[in-house]
Amino acid sequence: MASFQEAISSAVKTQATRRGLAYKDIASTMQISRSNFWRHLSNKQLWNSDDFEKLAEALGLHSSWELLRLAQNEQELASSQELMA
């Protein structure tokens, strides 16, 4: 089962792909370096609650709650794939 952090990262990757967003642009909108963003995305640095609103905005979502719902969906998908394996 994916951790909460992994689910957030997965939701970010999925939404970025859906919207055709470059990671460098997301990092810029969040006002963090690309390397810092990449550490978060690769789960080497934890996302914190202060990041969620900035992430949601950068991803074109209405609120951080929408980001959390996407993360929950990613968590459920990961769990179902583990059961099928």
Image (cartoon, rainbow, N blue to C red):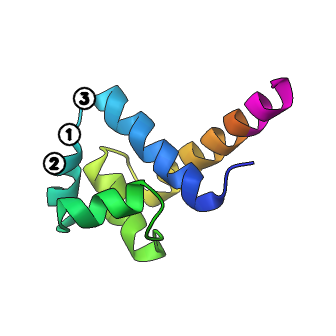
- The answer to which quarter of the image holds residue 57 is bottom left
> In the drawing, what numbered circle is on residue 20?
3
Question: Rounded to the nearest whole Å, what is the CA distance between mark 3 and mark 2?
Answer: 10 Å
Indicate the amino acid at tag 1: Ala
Residue 28 lies within the magenta run = no
Q: Which residues are magenta?
A: 79-85
* Residues packed near mark 2 inside 10 Å, few (<14), some (14 to 19) or many (20 plus): some
On the rendered structure, is 26 left or right of 70?
A: left
Q: Residue at x 76, y 39 (%)?
A: 79
Viewer-closest of 67 and 8: 8
Please identify the residue farthest to the top as the structure is shown. Answer: 84
Q: Residue at x 47, y 74 (%)?
A: 49
Indicate the amino acid at tag 3: Gly
> In the drawing, what numbered circle is on residue 22?
1
Q: Are marks 3 and 2 in contact (CB under 8 Å)?
A: no
* Residues packed near mark 3 inside 10 Å, few (<14), some (14 to 19) or many (20 plus): few
Residue that mark 2 sits on: 25
Image x and y of residue 16, in percent: 33, 37
Whether 25 is drawn above or below 77: the answer is below
